[in-house]
Image (cartoon, rainbow, N blue to C red):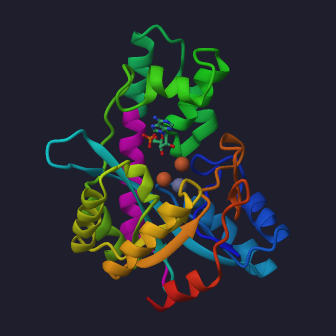
Amino acid sequence: MIDLHTHTNESDGTCTPLELIDRALAMGLEALAISDHDTFAGYDQALGPAREYGLDLVCAIELSARLDSDGVKRRTVHLLGYFLHQPPSIEFRTWLQELQAARRERNVRLIAKLQSLGVEIELSEVERLGRTLTGRPHFARVLIQKGYAADWEEVFRKYLDDSAPGFVERESPDVANGIQRISAAGGLPVLAHPVRLGIRNRASEESLIGKLRDAGLRGIEVYHSDHSDSDQARYREIAKRFSLALTGGSDFHGDVKPGVALGTGVSGALRIPRSVLDELRKA
Ligand code: AMP
Ligand code: FE
Ligand code: FE
Ligand code: ZN
C-alpha cells in the first residue's frame, strides 16, 4: 500500500515531516509522497530521515490554479506535480517563492477585511500556525478558536469561502500555466481530486478533463478519500480514454481533518497498490 497525497505542517497539515515519516513506517506504507501546497519545505526535511529508514519518499507539490470556465462561476483547480526522476528545477522553486509572497500579500488584505467585519484578529496569530504557508485553513482555526464560528463548515460559510463576505482574491496561476510550470520543472502534472470540481454533468466533466489534457495534463488522481467507488471507476475510465496516468492518495492533513487517515483514507476504505507508483515511474 502507498499514499501519494499528504500534507505536513509546512503547509496546512498538522504533522511535522518527521512525524509523517514515522507514521508511514509504522503502518508499513511502501511509498509516501509529500505533496504540500506551494512548498517543498516538508519534503526537503523528510528526505534525509526517509533514506535513513528506508522509506520510498516521492517529491510532490500541490498548486491551486484558476479555471476560467466560460463565464461560469470562477473555479479553483488543484494540480499535483510529481517529481519522479529528477528534483524540481531552481526556477520552479523561485516561482514558488513568488506565489508565497502573493499569498502573504493576500493575507494582509484578508486580515484588514476581517477586521472591517468586526473580527478581532491579527496576522501574527495566524502566522504562528501557518508560518511561510499561511492560508485560509489557518485563519479558520484561529476564528474557530476565538469563537467566531463553531466549526469548519460555518467558518468558511460565514467568513472565508470564495462566496463569503470576508473573501479576498489571491493571485494564482491559470491552470494551463500551472500545468506548463510543473512540466517545465521536470514534474508530471496531475489533476487532483477531480470530484471536487463539482461538475455534475458527465459530458461537461469529460470535456473539461479533455481540455486539461490538451493543455499538457499527464495524470489524474483516481484514488482519493473524497471519491466513492463509482467516482473511482469513472475516473479510471476517463484516464483510459485520455491516456492519463493514474495516481492516488489520502490527502492526509493530520488533526485538522481527523476523518482522513494516512494511507487508508475515510473509514479505511482506501487501498492504493504499489503498482500505481511503478506505472507512474514508467510514464
Ligand atoms: P488558500 O490557499 O489560503 O486560499 O486556502 C485554500 C484552502 O482553504 C483550500 O485548499 C481548502 O483546504 C480550504 N477551503 C477553501 N474553501 C473552503 C470551504 N468552502 N470549505 C472548507 N475548506 C475550504
Ligand atoms: Fe490542504
Ligand atoms: Fe487539494
Ligand atoms: Zn491536498
* Residue located 73% across and 60% down the image: 20
Q: In this view, does 270 lie to the left or right of 163?
A: right
Toward which corner of the image does residue 275 lie, by quadrant?
bottom right
Range of residues picked out in magenta:
86-106
| Residue 42 in picture, x, y percent from top left | 62, 60
- Position above or below: 174 against 246: above
In the image, is residue 35 part of the stretch drawn in magenta?
no
Q: In this view, does 11 lie to the left or right of 65?
A: right
* Residue located 41% across and 54% down the image: 97
Please tell me which residue lies in front, 273 or 79.
273
* Residue located 58% across and 22% down the image: 143
- Position above or below: 225 against 249: above
- Position above or below: 201 against 28: above
* Residue located 65% across and 79% down the image: 273
Q: Quadrant of the C terminus?
A: bottom left
Secondary structure character of the magenta stretch overall: helix
In the image, is residue 100 part of the stretch drawn in magenta?
yes
Residue sitting farthest toward the top = 118
| Residue 73 in picture, x, y percent from top left | 24, 38
| Residue 108 in picture, x, y percent from top left | 41, 28
